[in-house]
Image: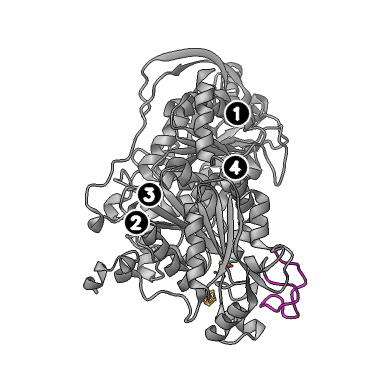
Amino acid sequence: MGNVQRKRIAAQTGNEAMAYAMKQINPDVVAAYPITPATEIMERIAHRFRELPGRVFIQMEDEIGSICCMNGATAAGLKAMTATSGPGFSLMQEGIGYSVMAELPCIIVNVMRGGPATGTPTRTSQADVMQARYGTHGDHPIVAVCPWSVRECFDLTVTAVNISERLRLPVIILMDEIVGHMREVVELPEKVNVWHPDKPKPPRENYYHYDDQNNYDACIASFGEGYRIHLTGLTHRKDGFPTDEPEIIKWNLDRLRRKIEDNRSWLWDMDYLDLGSETVIVSYGTAGRSAMAAKAQFEAQTGRRVGIVRLRMVWPFPVQRLMALLRSARRVIVPEMNQGQLYREVERTVSLNVSVVSVQRYDGEMLTPEEIIDAL
Amino acid sequence: MRELKNDPFLDFFRVDERFPHILCPGCGIGTTMATMVRVFLDLGIKQDELCVVSGIGCSSRVTGYLDCDTFHTLHGRALPAATGIKLARPDMKVVVIGGDGDIMAIGGNHFIHSARRNLDLTVIVVNNFTYGMTGGQYSPTTPTQERAATAPFGNVERSFNVCFIARAAGAMFVARSTTFHVAHLKKMIQLALQKNGFSVVEVISQCPTFYGRYQGLGDAVKMLEWLKTRSVDVEKVANPWSVKDRFVIGVLHDQEEVPPYSQLYQELRNRAKEK
Ligand SMILES: Cc1ncc(C[n+]2csc(CCOP(=O)(O)OP(=O)(O)O)c2C)c(N)n1
Ligand code: SF4
C-alpha cells in the first residue's frame, strides 16, 4: 500500500508529516476541535486545504461534533479525518461506535497525553491504548496503528486510510506527544496510492447496503446517488433498517467481527529483529525507540543478543503471528509509557513457561534505555 | 399493496417494508411527517435529491419511514451529521427532524452553532414538551411546575423558547405551528424549505401517551382541542416574545438572506488561492 512515486526531503515533525500525508491522501473533510498536542495538525491542514479544490476544513463546536460531522461526510461519499488528544478522544467515543455500526470509514488521530480527565497536556504518554480498543460500548472490532518516527507518521496515515476504506471501519492513529513534536530529516513521497471503494452495480431495487458480499472491499452507495439508503446506529438488517430479531443481531455483530477475522492474513504490521534470542522486547510507538537503544547498549555491554518486536499495528492484536515469533523466547519485556496496558495482551499470547515483564513509565517522561536494560 | 405506489404521496414512504409504524395512536409526529412530505411534493423536491437526518427519539424515527436518503444518527447529533452531508454535497436538500430533547437538550450546543454558521438546511423541532421515547421525563421545554416521570412533584426548572433561541443564535427563518393547524403547518414548513440558509420550524405536537397523561390533558382529540385553543396567531399579538401561556404561531423571524456557510467557504477558498 502507499506506492512511492517521488520523494521530498525535509526536516519535519511527526505532526507536520501527518498533515503532509493528509494532504497527499486528499481527504475531503477534516473536522476538528483544538487540543494540545494535536492542534498543529489541524492548523496545517486548515492552511493547506486552501490550495485543494472541493476540500473543507471545519472547526466544530466540540469533538462530538467533529466525529458526527465526519460520519455525515463519509455517508455522503467523502473521506474524513480528525486529530485530537485524550479528552477529545473520550468525547468522540459514542460517535466512533456509530462509525463502526453504520460502517463509515474515518481516520482519528489521537496524540496521547495521559489522563484521566485533563491529564498532562504538555507531556507524553501511551495511556490510551485500551481506550482505542474498548472506548466505545458494545462488542466491536477496531484497528489502531502506532508510529514511532516522523516517517511512520506519514506512512501509517496512508496505511490507516487504506485499511479504513477497505474494511469500512474507523481507524485510530495512536501517536504520542514525542513523536508528534519530534523533528527528523525524512524523505516523504510526493504521491501515494489510496484505495477508493467502487460504486454499486445493481439497481436500487436489488441493492443492499449491508449485503454479505459488501462487508469489506465493498461497492458502496453514498447519499445523493439515488440509492435511497438508510443508515442507523441501531442493530440493522442487510437493507439498513433496524430490527431486534435475535438472529439478525447476531448476524450484524458477526459481520462486524468478520471484517477483522477474514482479513487477518494481511491485517498486521510489525518489525522484528534477532528473534532467535532468549530475551525479546515487545514494544510500540516511541517506547520502541527506547527499546532499540536498550538493545544496542545491552549487546555492547554483555555481548548477548536481544530480540525486538515492534508493533506498528496494535489493534487487532496480532495473536497468532506474535505466538509464532516468540516461540523460542524465554523472557519477554514489554516497555510502555502507561501502567502496562499491552503487557497483558502479550502475556496471554505467549506460552506459560515464558516470563513476561512489564516495564512502565507514566510520569510524562519518555522511557530511558536504562530502565529497559534493568529488566533485561 | 403495489398499486398504491402510483400515488406520489405514498410513494414517498417505504410503505411495503416499514409500515405499520411504531408511533402511538393519536401521536402528532405522524401529522408532522405527512405534512412535511406534502411540502416536498408541492415544492417538487425529488426523493433522490433529499436527505432527511434525525437523532434519537420518537420524532427522530421519521427517517425510518421515508423513501429517500435517510440518516438516523445518534441522540442529539443530527445537526453535526447534517453538517457533514452539507459539506460533502452542498447541492443536496437536507432536512433535520427531531424532538425537543434531541435538539434542545443533548443537541442544544449543535443547534446554536449550526444556526450561527448559517448552514443551508431546515430543522423541524417536534416539541411535545417531553421525552416521549424514554417514557415522559421532563425536557428543556417542559413548563415550570408541570409534572413528568422525573418530576413527580412538579418541574422546578425553567423552560426554553425554541424559536427565541433559534433567532438569537442566528437562524434566517423561524416559525412555529402546531399539529392541529395542519394547513398552517404546511405553509410554515414550505416557507422554511424555500429559505436559503438556516431555517427552523417548531411544531407543537401532542404526546397523548406521556405528556397528555401527566398533565391530565386527555386523549389525542382533547389534546388537539388544547392545541387549538392555546394557540394565537402572531398577527394578533403585539410582541410574540413576551406572550406567556399561549402558543404564538406563524412566522416569528424572517430576515434578509445572507450567504450560507458553504457559499462563503467557496468564496474564501477563491480568495485564498489568489494570494
Ligand atoms: C446518549 C444518549 N442518551 C440517552 C438516550 C436515551 N434517549 C433516547 S430518546 C431520548 C429522548 C427523546 O426525547 P425527544 O428528543 O424529545 O423526542 P420524542 O421521543 O419526545 O419525540 C433519550 C433521552 C440515548 N439514546 N442516547
Ligand atoms: S410516546 Fe408520545 S411522542 Fe412517542 S410515539 Fe407515543 S405519543 Fe408520540
Residue B78 counted in the magenta span: no
Real-space CA distance between mark 2 and mark 1, rounded to the nearest whole angstrom: 38 Å
Q: Are marks 3 and 2 in contact (CB under 8 Å)?
A: no
In the rendered image, which quarter is residue A355 located in?
top right
Do marks 4 and 1 share a subunit?
A: yes
Q: Which residues are magenta?
A: B142-160
Q: Is residue B210 above or below residue B191?
A: below
Does label 1 or label 3 sit earlier along the sequence? Answer: 1
Q: CA distance from mark 2 to mark 4?
A: 29 Å
Subunit ID for the residue under disc 2: B
- Tell me residue A247's x, y (percent): 35, 68
Q: Are marks 1 and 3 on the same chain?
A: yes
Q: Which mark is residue A223?
A: 3
> Which one is in front in this view, the residue at disc 3 or the one at disc 2?
2
Q: Quadrant of residue B76?
A: bottom right
Amino acid type for the residue under numbered disc 1: Glu
Q: Is residue A104 visible?
A: no
- Residue that numbered label 1 is attached to: A43
Q: Secondary structure at mark 1?
A: helix
Instruction: Give the residue number, with chain letter if any, for mark 2.
Output: B47
Amino acid type shown at disc 3: Phe
Dominant secondary structure of the residues highlighted in magenta in the image: loop
* Quadrant observed for ligand 1 in the rendered image: bottom right
x%, y% of residue A158?
A: 43, 30
Cβ atoms under marks 2 and 1 closer than 8 Å = no
In the image, taking residue A45 as reference, residue A318 lies left or right, namely: left
Amino acid type shown at disc 4: Met
Q: Nearer the viewer, residue B129 or B250?
A: B250
Mark 4 secondary-structure assignment: loop
Q: Quadrant of the N terminus of chain B?
A: bottom left
Give the residue displayed 50% in from the left and 39% down from the top: B262
